[in-house]
Image (cartoon, helix red, strand yellow):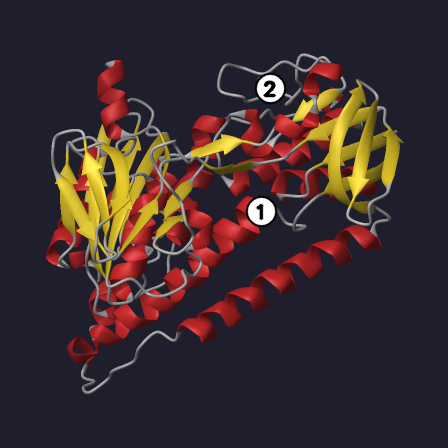
Amino acid sequence: MNFVVVGGGPAGIQAASYAARLGAQVTVVEKDVLGGAANLWDCIPSKAMIATGGLLALLSRASRMGVSDVQLYPELDSIKARIASITEHLERSNRDLLGSQGVRVIQGEARFLDSHHIAVQSISGDEIELGGDAFLIATGSRPRVPDWAPIDGDRILTTRQAYPPPEIPKHLVVIGSGVTGVEFVHMFRTFGSKVSLIVSRQQILPQKDPEVAAALETDFLDSGVKLYKGARAKGISRDEDGNVVVACDDGRSIAGSHCLLAIGSLPNYESLELDKAGVMLDDSGYIPVDHHCVSNVKHIYAAGDISGKLPLASVATMQGRKVAEHIMGLDTREHHHLDYDKAASAIFTEPEIADVGLAEAEAFALGRKIRVTKVPFAANARALINGDSRGFIKIVSDPATGVVLGGSIVGERAAELISVIALAVTAHLKVADIVESLLVHPALAEALAEAAD
């Protein structure tokens, strides 16, 4: 089996690695960083900056824990060096992994010649033609920039120009109140910036549980973040003093030192010449796939952001594994398809937010009977010891069987704690299975058992 992977992000690397272990001859073509631009230029740098901001936020609460006179400030050059070190280490690890498995890696840009051949324009200037029995398209996405946003990389930024930005903004105006937008709000407020957030609807995080969104809104407001609800940005300009001014469709204008655009992403497909391979796109430029991640061409697969499924690195990684299994025939054995409804996700604000499975509001909208139990971290000993008792754990279960259907967590370490609920949802465990687990004391995880009880 000659398997060609176009795109070396989480989906591409996992598919290449697993297929090679199963005996395929694998070639990976990647034009930027091995590990994925969205991962190593977006996800990892943002979380590194959030970790730095989290330390600053923790120290700001030091007086609650009996420590006084702690004052630290972010140092931009050191943050840049730290991010570069982390991403370089991860890219090197990916190269070492694929190299140890005999995977050929070509740095360059690919385009299809027909359904079984691609041409690669390498960074050395050579054009290489490759044939394959199967192909995976995993070219990811890029930040969406509308015509009314004159991005300059200085004061008007996309997300990828803000890890970190040229300078720490005095007043940052964030456009977009989805996951990426609220993470930036949190990040820069911990760095000392004044932050304004333009919210096109009446709730930040419009796709999340309203109670979860409300908890984060409260924290934002308490920390001085200004929310402009029901406002949709329609233009960005600079005034005579150099300030950035965002005009909204309701007549309001918000001025700041910097503006950050966080309004979604677009799939990377333009240079692939997919029409020559017969691969179809939907109206938004994504490649529709079936439960095996197969496109309309039976030997061409798509995974990661370009597949139009959940834009999460964890989902892309699992898609890559499933692609390798299907290519190598393992789907003829006991095989579990991806259930995207059971994917856990997290938002690295403070407090952290995480959820998985069926949400309370979604269940009510569907008319489904559920049992909802909730425990605040204010009742948890470890949260009090840590000096941060914000948030709660909510578990959704089937009232007839006790099977865990989903859950939401707002609070410290939510991204880690959600793993327990995710396992319960995936394995069809019951709330009793969580209740009867002998957990560590004192620990934040005890709230999981209390919420399940």
**Location of residue 83 in the rendering, given as x and y in whole percent from the top left corner:** 51, 65
Describe residue 140's horizontal placement relative to residue 20 as left or right.
Answer: left
CA–CA distance in space, label 1 to label 2:
25 Å
Q: Is residue 74 visible?
A: yes
Q: Name the amino acid type tagged 2.
A: His
Q: Quadrant of residue 63?
A: bottom left
Q: Pointer 2: what residue?
A: 291
Q: Quadrant of the N terminus?
A: top right
Report the number of numbered marks. Answer: 2
Asked if residue 150 lies left or right of residue 173, the reply is right
Mark number displayed over residue 74: none
Identify which residue is drawn at 37% across, 61% down. 50
Q: Which image quadrant for residue 269?
A: top right
Q: Identify the secondary structure beneath mark 2.
A: loop
| Residue 28 figure quarter | top right
Closer to the camera, 186 or 344?
186
Residue carrying label 1: 37
Q: From the viewer's perspective, is the residue at label 1 or at label 2 nearer?
A: 1
Please tell me whether residue 157 is drawn above or below residue 69 in the rendered image: above
User: Tag 1, which secondary structure?
Assistant: helix
Q: Is residue 276 above or below residue 335?
A: above
Dot 1, how many residues are within 10 Å of its Cα: few (below 14), some (14-19), or many (20+)?
A: many
Whether residue 435 can be seen here: no
Q: Position of residue 409 (x, y in %)?
A: 29, 46
Q: Are marks 1 and 2 in contact (CB under 8 Å)?
A: no
Residue 99, how many percent across, how many down? Answer: 82, 53
Image location of residue 74, percent across then percent down:
35, 74
What residue sits 49% from the left and 50% below the top? Answer: 42
- Sequence-wise, which precedes: disc 1 or disc 2? 1
Q: Residues within 10 Å of mark 2 (few under 14, many from 20)?
A: few
In depth, the one of 67 and 220 nearer the eye is: 220
Query: Could you tell whether 262 is left or right of 122 in the image?
Result: left
